[in-house]
Image (cartoon, helix red, strand yellow):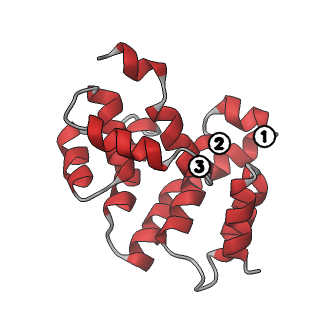
């Protein structure tokens, strides 16, 4: 088994520290695609939630390292795999959620039109409108049995009771 496959197996078992270690090692191989980098970014992003980090026994120094590593990984994803809507959506989302930058809904809408799952989730969460409801519902069905932290994160946002209260 290569490290990319091991990372996915550990991620599916909800072992984020071990999965992150395997993803990091896998990055040095050609066995990865952009989804592996995004799955690692999602783990590191989730570690920025101190409750998630504490539940998984992540040291504060590691949380800081992960926060600094996220933009590096996103740039690496772009350089290695070119531009994709999902990579661009994660760049925007990190700017908005971690760096507190103001990101316009129109930027997410353009990425949603290109097929970004994160952009669809973000727009449905922010707008709660019928515009993205069908696509969000289809994504929710696809994520019924999430296998990565990235999928679990998207599913948790889609299933948030906050979304229901805004409609």
The part of the image, by quadrant, that contains residue 141 is top left
Q: Nearer the viewer, residue 92 or 12?
A: 12
Q: Is residue 155 left or right of residue 53?
A: left
Circle 1 SS class: loop
Q: Which residue is mark 1?
A: 56
Find disc 2 in the rendering and name its residue: 47
**Is 90 situated above or below 81?**
above
Judged by depth in the image, the label closer to the viewer, 2 or 3, is 3
Per the model, the C-alpha gap separating discs 3 and 1 is 18 Å
- Circles 1 and 2: CB atoms closer than 8 Å: yes
The image quarter containing residue 54 is top right
Q: Secondary structure at mark 2?
A: helix
Q: Which residue is mark 3?
A: 146
The span from disc 1 to disc 2 (Cα, nearest Å) is 9 Å
Q: Quadrant of the N terminus?
A: bottom right
Mark toward the start of the polypeptide (1 vs 2) = 2
Number of residues whose C-alpha sits closer than 10 Å to that of mark 2, classed few (under 14), some (14–19) or many (20 or more)? many
Residue 41: horizontal and vertical position, in percent?
55, 55
Q: Residue at x 39, y 47 (%)?
A: 118
Q: Is residue 62 left or right of residue 37?
A: right
């Amino acid at each position: 088994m290569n490290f990319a496959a091991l990372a996915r197996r550990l991620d599916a078992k909800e072992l984020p520290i071990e999965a992150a270690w395997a993803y990091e090692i896998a990055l040095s191989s050609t066995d990865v695609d952009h989804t592996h980098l995004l799955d690692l970014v999602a783990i590191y992003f989730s570690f920025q939630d101190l409750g998630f980090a504490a539940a998984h026994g992540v040291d504060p120094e590691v949380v800081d390292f992960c926060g600094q590593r996220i933009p590096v990984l996103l740039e690496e994803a772009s350089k290695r795999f070119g531009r994709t809507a999902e990579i661009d959506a994660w760049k925007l989302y990190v700017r908005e959620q971690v760096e507190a930058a103001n990101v316009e809904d129109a930027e997410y809408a353009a990425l949603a039109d290109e097929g970004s799952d994160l952009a669809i989730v973000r727009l449905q969460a922010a707008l709660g409108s019928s515009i993205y409801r069908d696509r969000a519902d289809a994504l929710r069905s696809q994520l019924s049995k999430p296998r990565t932290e990235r999928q679990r994160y998207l599913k948790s946002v889609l299933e948030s009771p906050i979304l229901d209260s805004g409609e």
